[in-house]
Image (cartoon, grey):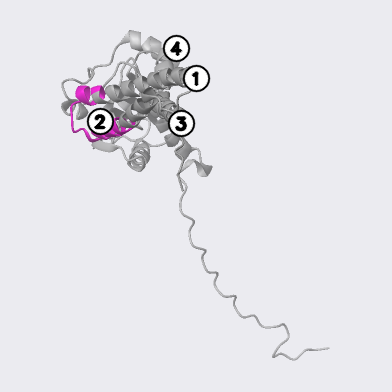
Amino acid sequence: MVRRRIAEDPVSQLAIWSRRIALFSLVATFIAIVIVRSGALDIVPALSTLAGALLLAVIAILLAFGAGIFIWRDGLGGLRQAVSAVLIGLALIAYPAYLGVRARQLPAIYDVTTDPIDPPQFDAIARLRPRDANPIAYQGLYAAEQQRAAYPDIEPDDTSVAPQRVFDVAMKIITKRRWRIVDAQPPRVSDAGAGSDPRAAQDGIIEAVARSLILGFPEDVVVRIRPTSDGTRIDVRSASRYGRNDLGSNAARVRDLISDIDDVFTKPGGEEEREPEPPQKKPPPRPTQERGKGRSVRR
């Protein structure tokens, strides 16, 4: 019996190479993210590796579109390879493209604080920052104006709660968020007690390092807890170590931290919710004698 060979349509080489490059860019992007998060390389070569991987994804998309033209014109095979290359490439560049659009909508600042006039200072963290990081000093009035226009809700938080109580709650929230605490100094209130001169007190300071969601870039945070005559003033500052545009991450971090602290004190009773106390057992009732029992009743 003679078998007939069915001639298969030739496959577009552009389609084959587009998928190969798309798969390679996928692996390269994953490796670049691991390198950036681990800190195995300096920030510049690590980001260059990531940028190269994303560039390969764009090249894969262009090759896939070119292959589509030849497939349509010459009736070649390879449509599946071209479509898969486009899907992989779009999946890789979708989030960076979104960040690029967002960067055009937000001010080019990397340092956000609730007090631009007297911002909380980085002390312990300043000694840990590498030389190629952003300046540790606040950017000044220009940055303050841009922040006010973009994030008008970023303001100091005044509360009637005692400074030590605020410090303890802030430490608990920061620990829960798994930020690396670099330094923590509790506030000191004057011995004269409430109503004394707040200038005689000492601010509480918490310095910590947070991480961005995907690439894990270090972003420094300092919380200042200042005793006042009426309670406590809370100021927060968050600054990115790298990049001229934080894409709103620092403002969101400051806003969420203050909101979490306020939520604790706005619960019923104005205090942090406590574990319910076990019900106390009521003492057994005293035995009572019936009236007339054991006595002679006169009629």
Residue receiving disc 1:
72
Cα–Cα gap, marks 4 and 3: 49 Å
Secondary structure mostly taken by the magenta-highlighted segment of the chain: helix
User: Could you say which is closer to the camera, residue 174 or residue 206?
Assistant: 174
Question: Residue 45 lies in magenta, yes or no?
Answer: yes
Mark 4 or mark 3: which is in front? Answer: 3
Amino acid type shown at disc 3: Arg
Q: Kindly tell me whether residue 120 is visible in this rendering.
A: no
Mark 2 or mark 4: which is in front? Answer: 2
For marks 1 and 2, the one nearer the N-term is: 2
Label 3 neighbour load within 10 Å: few <14, some 14-19, many 20+: few
Q: Secondary structure at mark 1?
A: helix
User: Could you say which is closer to the camera, residue 136 or residue 158?
Assistant: 136
Quarter occupied by residue 77: top left
Residue 136: % across, % down: 23, 19
Residue receiving disc 4:
149
Amino acid type shown at disc 1: Trp
Q: Which mark is residue 80?
A: 3
Chain part drawn in magenta: 26-48
Cα–Cα gap, marks 1 and 4: 51 Å
Left or right? Give the position of 151 relative to 32. Answer: right
For marks 4 and 3, the one nearer the N-term is: 3
Q: Secondary structure at mark 4?
A: helix
Name which residue lies at 37% across and 22% down: 14
Residue pushed farthest right?
Answer: 299
Q: Secondary structure at mark 2?
A: helix
For marks 1 and 4, the one nearer the N-term is: 1
Cα–Cα gap, marks 2 and 4: 32 Å
